[in-house]
Image (cartoon, rainbow, N blue to C red):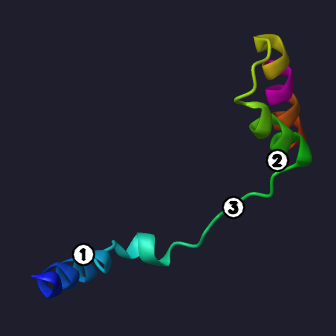
Amino acid sequence: MIVVVGAWLAGCANHLPAQEREAPVQHQEETNVCMVYRAMMTAPMPPQDMERLRVACEASMPE
């Protein structure tokens, strides 16, 4: 039974669409301002301060 379950899981793991298997990982370098914004997203702070951090993050990102 363990062998059957293991084979079934192994078979399912290899059936990804070709796009997902071969797609290059696209990541964007995050600025220090955005790292601060993301770190503070769960911090208790007034909404206007959170908005200020969000706007600063967006402004710091390269086009």
**Inter-mark Cα distance, 1 to 3:** 27 Å
Camera-side residue of 20 and 34: 34
Mark linked to residue 48: none
Q: Residues within 10 Å of mark 3 (few under 14, many from 20)?
A: few
Is 10 located above or below residue 34 in the figure?
below
Camera-side residue of 41 and 53: 41
Q: Reply yes or no: does residue 54 show up in magenta.
A: yes
Identify the element where label 1 is drawn. Answer: helix
Camera-side residue of 7 and 3: 3
Q: Reply yes or no: does residue 18 show up in magenta.
A: no
Q: Which residue matches tag 3?
A: 27
Q: Which residue matches tag 1?
A: 12
User: What type of secondary structure mainly makes up the magenta span?
Assistant: helix
Identify the element where label 2 is drawn. Answer: loop
The N terminus appears in which quarter of the rendering?
Answer: bottom left
Q: Earlier in the sequence, mark 1 or mark 3?
A: 1
Amino acid at pointer 3: His
Identify the element where label 3 is drawn. Answer: loop
Q: Earlier in the sequence, mark 1 or mark 2?
A: 1
- Which of pointers 1 and 3 indicates the residue nearer the eye? 1
Q: Earlier in the sequence, mark 2 or mark 3?
A: 3
Residue at 85 percent of width and 27 percent of height: 53
What span is colored magenta in the figure? 51-55
